[in-house]
Amino acid sequence: MAANVYASATDGGSGGDSAATRSGTGVRTAGATIDCPDVGTKLTSVPEQARGEVDKELALLDEQIAKAYQQLSEAAQQMQQDPGFADNAIVNPLQEKRGASLERIAIAIDRVGDRPEGLEALAACTVQDGNQAPAQGEGQDGAAGEQPGQEQGQAGQEQGNGQGQGANGGQAGNGPVAADFADINSVQPNVNDPRPQGDASRGSFATSCGVNENGLFNSDNIIAAPGVTNGAHHFHDYVGNQANNAFASDQDLANAETSCDDQGDKSSYYWPVVRLQNGTQEQDAQKPGGGIEGNAGEIVTPKQVTLTFVGNPREKVTAMPRLLRIITGDAKSFVNGPANANASWSCTGFEDRQLKDKYPLCPQGSDVVRTFKFQSCWDGRNIDSANHRTHVAFADAAGNCPSGFRPIPQLVQRIVYDIDAPSLQDGGRTTPLFAVDSFPEQLHKPGTDHGDFINIFDEDLMGEMVDCINGGRKCGAGAGGGQDPAPGEEPQEPTKSPEAPQEEPTKTPEAPQEEPTKTPEAPQEQPTKTPDAPQNGNGGGKPGDQGDDGDDGDDGKGGAAKPPADKPDPEPDPEPEPGDASTAPGGARPEVKATASADGGNAAEQGGGSKNGDDQDTDGLGDSQAVGQATSAAPAPSAPSRTEPQAVGEGGLADTGAQLWPAAAGAVLVIAGFVVLRRVRRSHM
């Protein structure tokens, strides 16, 4: 039976009409997908000399699955006539191809190291019911406690009341279905961040890199499949570095342009695009990674993207190594299981409620939000690992890193979309369904959402970030984006952003006369607004959501006010204590002996670690490799990025002016009195 591309969301495609999908991939089967073991997660150790060959074979395994799924999706009639057709024509040939690839992987590793055992057992695949929830997987994350696959959202299981069963749904016939959505109002608050304790690093650093208004897309993945075109089999949005593709070298990335406001941040931030299932033929409709592989519909440009680095609730953070690569979430979690999944979906005004395995149905006036909290513990040695996971880890529920790992700034990526809740009752005909791009066999399940990051911060700017976070301040070119505070931290009024001093460079002494006891930061009631962020704008300079959960007023969606967020009133920043590290150019910097390797593989096992105030190693792992001798072609941050630390640090010009004006005024009065006294004496002589 062929699936109707729209009706499957509600009536299971039971109308019986054959329909070619709008992506041009042909008629699709109902409710079936290909389930193969994920070889990449099993390969936790691959010699550096074999890494390139192994990566290419892993990409070939993904391509084999994608082609097998396409065959399966077009074989509805044959499978109805012959129950053994799928095994004989699709699954068994796939197993043979996988076996050959696995043997080549084993040979490549055996050539320079120990031959891996048991790879041949990973060749077999099965046909899986696309409407079944995935089984608990065996993903490897190297973390304890805060496993991203926990707290799978159960609310909304009843959505659609079984509608959509028997078909994979969506514009291309491979998802989503009604059961993939949940009403955010049915979800109970479930966000529990640990409270900062002891030597916690309470600050945050925000960078503003736009919303991909440049339209930089591709279906590559330089982390997981370097040198392989269409290695992701789905389209990515890119912000920050503008040279990211499958063939970009580390030097290409270092020399690239960046969309970030602070040109010292050339990091690459990317994630799968979100599409409306409305029949639109996008630029990739007839291309691999796009419509040919079931990723169809209108690509939605984010309304807002905020990129915030936060601290650790237990201890100070150390600098990230240059070219550190992090993948968070699992693009194959539908068949792998949720062990490595890290999707979080919600709505503005409801972000204390996060969905892990459902897309949110947001009320009018509320926007869809997807959030990624990246791994925040680093092994101190490697900028990548064979399975792209074991060199980094999540902290546990109390904020502790696993043994042998040290805390680094945690990237919190928040992406907001102006998307109306789809009309599930008519299969999205009135208001279209939406879904994240995915590998074709993953059926656009919300739990497959994931994010990627490559650190290409200028070393001085990375040092600033660490000082800011460890010093308990809010800094960075994106500090006006309305980010949430660090985990467990009460919201505070942010300190002056780097651009803020430029707005009022000629402030006169009269302002302080009204409230002469205020600190330099106090007169700026809204210091987080930067010149690039309009009053109703986003971090990328586009009009839209300010990103604050508690925004009031019209957001452009029918005039409805957003639901209030459960946030306490902001508190003013504490004054810097005498011992605070300054982020001014002359401030203290971690002592470093070496930089991370830029050859795309594991960094040399160099020392690295956090220092205490006496410049002593506090974690027993040696000196940090993160910010050493400059190897980047990236320019140093521009002068405006230095003005913020001067304003909030010790002995800045603003402090001097605020403290000396009473003395200056007194001196003027004394001189004036002396002149008057002399004139009076002369008049009586």
Image: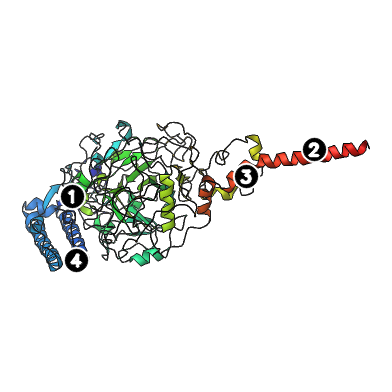
Marks 2,3: beta carbons within 8 A: no
Alpha-carbon span between mark 4 and mark 1 = 44 Å
Quickly name the residue at label 1.
2
Quickly name the residue at label 2.
673
Q: Is residue 173 left or right of residue 509?
A: left
Alpha-carbon span between mark 2 and mark 3 = 24 Å
Name the colour scheme: rainbow
Alpha-carbon span between mark 3 and mark 4 = 62 Å
Q: Type of residue at label 3?
A: Gly
Q: In this rendering, does residue 259 appear at all?
A: no
Q: In this rendering, does residue 222 appear at all?
A: yes
Mark in the foreground, 2 or 1: 2
Q: Residue at x 21, y 61 (%)?
A: 59
Q: Earlier in the sequence, mark 4 or mark 2?
A: 4
Q: Earlier in the sequence, mark 3 or mark 4?
A: 4
Mark in the foreground, 3 or 4: 3
Quickly name the residue at label 4.
50
Marks 2,1: beta carbons within 8 A: no
**Residue 541 coordinates in the image, percent (x, y):** 48, 50
Mark in the foreground, 4 or 1: 4
Q: Earlier in the sequence, mark 4 or mark 1?
A: 1
Quickly name the residue at label 3.
657
Q: Earlier in the sequence, mark 1 or mark 3?
A: 1
Q: Which quadrant holds residue 193?
A: top left
User: In front: 675, or 109?
Assistant: 675
Label 3, residues with CA under 10 Å away: few <14, some 14-19, many ≥20: some
Q: Is residue 244 left or right of residue 471?
A: left
Marks 1,3: beta carbons within 8 A: no
Q: Is residue 617 left or right of residue 118?
A: right
Element class at badge 4: helix
Mark in the foreground, 4 or 2: 2
Element class at badge 2: helix
